[in-house]
Structures are given as structure tokens and as C-alpha cells.
Amino acid sequence: MTAPRTLDPARLRRVFELERQGACRNTAVVGGLDRFLVQLSEDGLLRGTPLAEAARQLPPGGYRSLPPDERERWVDAVLAALAGGAPRLASAAPNAVPARQRAARPAAPPPPPPPLGPASPLTDLPGVSRAIAARFEKLGVTTVGDAAFLFPRRFNDYTNLRRIADLEPSSALQTIVADVLEAAEFRARGRLRGTRALVSDGSAALPVIWWNAPYVARNLNAGDRLVLAGRVRSYRGRLQLENPEFEKLERAGDSFARLEPVYPATAGLGQKTIRAVVARAVDAVSDRVADPVPGWLREQEGIPGIAAAIRTYHAPAKPEDAEHARQRLALGELLAVQCAVLLRRAEWQRSADAPCLDLGPLREPFVRSLPFPLTRAQQRALAEIERDLRGPSPMLRLLQGDVGSGKTVVAFAAMLAAVASGHQAALMAPTEILAEQHYRSLARLLGSGDLSALDGVFSPPWLGRSLRVLLVTGSLTPAQRAQVRGDAAHGGADIVIGTHALIEDDLQFPRLGLAIVDEQHRFGVMQRARLRQKGRNPHLLVMTATPIPRTLALTVYGDLEVSTLDELPPGRQPIRTRWYRPDERPDAYRFLRKRLDAGEQVYVICPLVEESDTLDVRSAEEEFEYLRSGPLAGYAVELLHGRMSARQKDDVMTRFARNEAQVLVSTSVIEVGIDVPNATVIVIEGAERFGLSQLHQFRGRVGRGEKQSYCLLFSSEEDPGPDARERLNAMCETTDGFALAEVDLRMRGEGETWGRLQSGTNTMLRVARLTDRDILLRARELAARVLERDPRLEHPEHAALAAAVRPFLDRAAEAN
């Protein structure tokens, strides 16, 4: 006897999932869904399944006659019905109940599925298979709530499409819809690769360039219709669209009179699928999302609820609606950030018994002993620091200033305040070179040429006593380290300068009153905390030569008060910067020889130590050999890089500082810590490969004296690409580190900028931007009000805010 035929529920559900993934184009099965349903009915497999009722609801023309939006609703209804209970035929079970009994006692309907919540797995959404969920997981989306908070990166404004014939060069995004005429990979001089395409919309044709993206060519075919959004520039007298985002469009049907959200994507997950899943998630849980802005605060301030903002931001009617919704969501994010940094600050200052440090009568003699007058900015910063040092709570202050602005002198004055008050001071630098440079600088200010790393005893006449300064690095011998450890622990050392070695367990400072961390961005929160834990509530001063825009200072460094050195010492001249293309090198070398003949010195910076098979840039070793046997033959050329021993590096730098070497070819090891006033020119090879902040740090190695200084930027390519062009042009246009910091942060984008406040793909800041200064300041004020009412966020009304704050505190605790 032949077994009754049955329908596999999983296979049935898979058919409709495939149809949904294919944007309901009736392509899930050969012949279309109508033929599939007819075949099921003829085979007797449709009766008794949830699909039967759905099939009866189709119009006479069947599924193929439905418009696209009604197809989606019908398929979603089928998937929902299939999820409510396994499809089953009346004859599928061997012990089926007789028909008369079924009529007399109707079967109870299956229980409804539990309502979706923000924590529900993404696969609980109708139409989301495990395969789709796995792709969403690459975007950090694993729950329905994650999907609701997967906000658009931007919108294609189909209400304001431009014709190609109407495009103009601009830094603003411009959107077009055009057909691909041709697309191919290209290779520029060297190893730069990319994709070049030609598109047309009937009004004109337009070249499109994707730099460093040869893979784009493999995804484009002649005849594809695309929506492209990017920046238009003029290149050699002709407009071209550079590095646009793009999306393939259907040939028919779609109306463009709307804002179309563009979401973060990943391989195998197109925008149509993302939009559909996100829309379902928003419908399901937006009203159940916890709002980090407490209810009492929303009521007092007239702040709208978060649910409306979520819905609007995913489907705005016009651009201003999207921006208003984004600002409301950003307020909640930045409120959590500000609560976190204020809680962290309160924790650091919980004890009010910090040592009272006062420079007192030594202030004027020290200032008079300096070989230069303090700038107004230095005087202001020193007054702010002295006020903190005399207070009962531990100082937590950031001292930021451009390269050459004189941060070190201000920090040394604070260290002398600790010594004058009977305490120790410690300064931690990220590299041995920088630690040694600080030691040398302090030795000069104390009036001594003795640069011994172990016997640094100084007796400046204005101090009235001897002063012991120790240098601690990882390269000390065991005997030297034992001596330093003993001097620090038994009070023989007044000031200790070093690297990470300062925070190792075997080094103790029983009288530590002030801890200073230089180049703060290179250390984690825990590292500066470990240094501070060496003493009993010592004051903390952190320094950075990387100017920080106010928004970032209030977030990443929001637990610190900020002092800014925004002027250079008198007599310093702005450094002249020029970008040289490859064919302009002979002119540059003639200029270098002229400066060397005038008795000045030159740095040459290279991205690599040795030659690379994959990167078309000059290495320090090959540049060293090329210069001393070629353009700069006859001049004393030295080589410096990080693979040398500490003694070798010290010997090279000593010769250069004494002008025994005229040209120093180096890697980025000289980014900080080198101070040779006679060095007036710095050449940066492969400048397009360095970030803007690092280029500015390199440039700060010259201009240390009163002579005019120069920065020569060498690019490996005639046209290194749009981002590199913008960086190099910015370097030529300004020497203002704060202006360059704004350009740098804008170019790097939100993700990298907020990196300290993010964790992998699960970003804690999803919509807040660097430009949200007004929102940030408002969030700061609101955070202070919340914490005044509930200092530890323990009240039930603040549970959602406490949950939003926790990841930021955890991130800080994990930093290293």
C-alpha cells in the first residue's frame, strides 16, 4: 500500500522566504507561485494547510496580478500563518480523527505566538530565515530591537534628483539615476587600482571613479540602472563622480518621489531586504523601546518620546523630519555618554583628601630662570593647574596644545609644585625617545648639561636645594632598575620620568603627589589609573599635542577639565608647506641643497623601514642609500628607525643634535620627542599614506627656532586619490592644528572618530555626530541634573538610562 503523500513544512516555508528575499518578483519557483499552488492543489497537498485560506484570498488573476506592495503583504501573511502552526494534511496522521467527530468537536486554534519584544531573536520576525539572520549578525544585528536601531547612513533624496547635465563641482552629495554604458577595472601608475565607469541619463554622460575599489567593476554590467550619490569634481577640465555609493534599481515601477533610506550593508544582504526587515522590526517594537531620557525630564523639557523619533528616522517625509528625529535620538545617546563621564569623574574625585601642592615663592624665580617668557596661554593654563593643585579634590585636567606651544614647561612647573610641597611627581610617556626628550628638556631648564639617566642630581640656584630626577625605561639593566626602584621607594627621587615601566608592580612612589601622562591618546583609561594608584589620591594631568575639537573633548575626555595652549611662543614663524608631485622632485632637491649649504639641517621621513613588494613607496633604507649617493651626495646623511637598539638611536640623535649629521632619514619614530632647533626642513615621502594628524605631528619637528622652516610633502602618485588630495591640500593651506583636527575628524567619519565610544560592530553611538555640539552641551547639562537627583542612577525611573550608560563605563574599564 502506498504511503500518503505529505508536504514538508520546512520546504514550504522556504519557498515563501525565497520569494520574500527576491522582492516578491514571482521567481522563487519555476513557473511562478500560481503554478506552484495549482500543482499543490492537484496533488491534494493544499487542503488542511494554512496556505489554503491564503490561496482562496488571491484575486482571479492570481498572485502574478498583484501589484508589488500587495504581493509583499500576501507573502508576509502566508509566512505568519505558517509560523503559527506546522502545515498538516488531513491524511497526514495515521490516527486521524473521523470527520463526524471533527465537525462535532472543532479543534482549538493554535495559541498565538508571544508578542515580539526588543530582545526577541531576529528570526522571530516573519520572513527572516536563519541565513538572513546570519548576514544581519555581521552588522551587529541579532535581535528585533537591534534591527529597529539599525539606522540609515544617509537617504537617497529622490525628490531632488539631478540631471547629469545640471551637475556642478561641489563637496556636497549629489544624486543621479543613470544607466551604465561601460565599466572596467583600471590600474594607475604604480599599484593603485580602481573601477572606472561611464553612465548616462539621456541628458549627458558622466565618468564615475571608484578609487582603490577594483571589485566594483565585477558587480556592474552595461545596461544596469543605478542610483548614485557622491561628490562631483572637475578633473582636467571634465566633471567626474568620485567614490559614490550606488544601488541597482528595477527598470519599471518604482516611483522616485521619496526619501529612500540607505542602510549599512554586507555581502549577500541588499538594501531591499534590509529595508523590509527593519520596517517590520520598527512596526513590532518601536513602542516598546526603553527611552534613556527619563520621563520626568522629557516632561519638564518638552522632549518628544523615542518611539516617534525611531519611526520618523526610518521613513521621513522630508529631509528636515529625518534631521529632527536624528537629533532626538542623538540626545539620548549623548545623555548616556555624559552621565558616564560625569560618573567616572565623580568616582575619581570621591575622596576629598588630595595633597595640597603649591609652587608658592618658587613660582617667580622659576619663571625668571626660563630662557623665554611664558605666553599668555601658558600663564592661563598654569594658573588653572595651580588652582586645582591647591584644592581638596584630586585634579583631573587635560592640557592640550599644538606642537611647539610649550606644554612641557607648564607640566614641569606643576611638577616643581609637588616637589616644593614635599611630594614626588611622575611623568609617563609612550616611548623611550619621548621620555628621554623630557628628561633632557627638564635638565636644560634646571640649568645643567648632565644628562645621566641615573645620577640626575640638579641644584638650580633659585630652588635652594638639590633635586633628584630619575629616568625609567624598559631598556635599563637589572642593576640600574634595582637602583631606580630603591631610590623611588625610599624617597631619594623627587621626579621620575619614564615609559610604561612606571606602572609595573615593582615600582612604588610613597609620596606621589602628581601624576602626568603625556600623549594621552596613546594610553588607555586603565593605564593612567594604574599610574595614579601608585600614590594616595595624587593629582592627575594628562597632555596631548593632538588638538581635540570641543565635541570630542567633552566625550572621550569628558571626565577631565581642559586647558588649551592656543598660541605659539614669540619669534616662531609659520612653517611653509608645499606638496611636490613626482616630476617636481629635482626642484625640491635643489631647495634642500640650498638650505644645507646655509648650515641648516633636514629630516626625511619614510613610511617603511625597508623595501616592500606590495607598497609602491620609498623605504627609509633605500631612501638613505639613494640620497647619500645621489641628490645629497657630499652631505652627512644618517639613518634612524625603530628596529635599532636604544643605544644606536641615541647615538644617531646625538650626532644630529650636534649638527655632526646634516640629514636624518627616519621612519615615524621621530613623530614626537625630537627637538633640534637648527633643523628647518622636513621632507615626508609617501605623504598620501599618512593621516592628517600624523602629518601635522611630523611637521612640528621643524619650526622649533627663529629661522624660517619648511615642510615638503612628496606623493608617490601624480594623483593619489580624493581623500589624500584633501589631506595634502589642507596641510598646505594651514598650520593651525585645531583647524586640521576638525578636517581630520570630518574626513575619517563618525565610526573612527567615535572609536573610543564603540565596541566592534555593536556601536553604542549610532546617530550622534561630531557636529552635534549644541546637543552635546545640552546633554551635559541634563546629565548633571539627573545625577544631582540620583548620583548613582539607582532609582527605577532611571533604569533605562543606567542600562545605556553601562556599556560606556564597561568600555572605559576594559581600556588598556
Image (cartoon, rainbow, N blue to C red):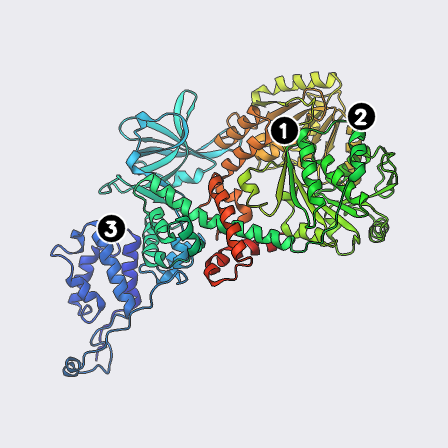
| 531, 67: nearer the viewer | 531
Query: What is the CA distance from the residue labelled 1 to the residue labelled 3?
Result: 56 Å
Query: What is the CA distance from the residue labelled 2 to the residue labelled 1?
Result: 22 Å
Can see residue 481? yes
| 770, 773: nearer the viewer | 773
| 554, 97: nearer the viewer | 554
Residue type beneath disc 3 = Arg
Can see residue 717? no
* Residue ID for mark 3: 25
* Residue ID for mark 1: 684
Apparent side of residue 477 relative to residue 618 in the rendered image (left or right): right
- Whichever of callouts 3 and 2 sits on the residue coming sooner in the sequence is 3
Residue situated furthest left in the rendering: 60
* Residue ID for mark 2: 660
Above or below, comparing residue 166 to residue 328 in the picture: above
Apparent side of residue 688 relative to residue 454 in the rendered image (left or right): left
